[in-house]
Amino acid sequence: MKQGLWAAIALLASVGLARAEFPAPGTVLAEITVDVTGDGTPDTARLVVGTDADAVLVLDTGQRRVTAPKIAWLGGPAPGPSLEATSAGSLQVVTGNDSIGRERWSQTLTLAWRDDDLLLAGFTYGWRDTLDAANTGRCDVNLLTGRGVLTVNGQETAITQPPDRLPVTLWDGQPPRSCGLD
């Protein structure tokens, strides 16, 4: 009985310690400068710690500020979510889990400036089960065209869905239904 109690106390202490080490809301996790809007002037994108276990994307274009809450999960170990720029000037928010539990995953959101708004243009998600080597997959969808590929355990299937012009400010963190991940 005492061992169980001490184990529970140790667990609570470690949870408290982990919370104390978690970055404060507003802490900048990543920053990148790229001409996202295509107007010839560099724009600044930042990932900052939100009030939950999520990162918030803030894009400053000089003319306006676009904020996308809950753009990435912060619950995993360092280095955490990151920002990248594509050769076409789009942003990519990259996050994942490659160390905790048996379900490992990576996610890349591609964000593109279209019609004076930042849209979720692409969704890529890969997964693997460390205890079941046959449980692997990848979903890669261009949301602006509605075309992509779903690969599950080595079997590829073409994805065709209606094009979606979703402003990143409205993205709720749910993958496209065509990926079958819900």
Image (tube, helix red, strand yellow):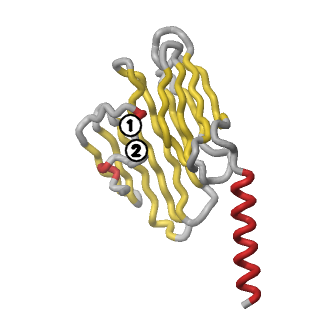
Q: Is residue 54 left or right of residue 112?
A: right
- The kind of residue tagged 1 is Leu
- The kind of residue tagged 2 is Asp
Is 73 situated above or below 82?
below
Looking at the image, how many numbered discs can be counted on the residues? Answer: 2
Numbered circle sitting on residue 172: 2
| Residue under label 1 | 170
Is 17 situated above or below 119?
below
Where's residue 49, x and y in %?
A: 61, 41
Residue at 28 percent of width and 45 percent of height:
159
Circles 1 and 2, Cβ within 8 Å, touching? The answer is yes
The quadrant in which the C terminus is found is bottom left
Furthest residue in direction bottom, as rendered: 1
Residue nearest the viewer, comparing 28 with 176 = 28
Per the image, label 2 sits on a secondary structure element best described as loop
Residue at 56 percent of width and 66 percent of height:
102
Where's residue 87, x and y in %?
A: 51, 23
The quadrant in which the N terminus is found is bottom right
Residue at 41 percent of width and 22 percent of height:
113
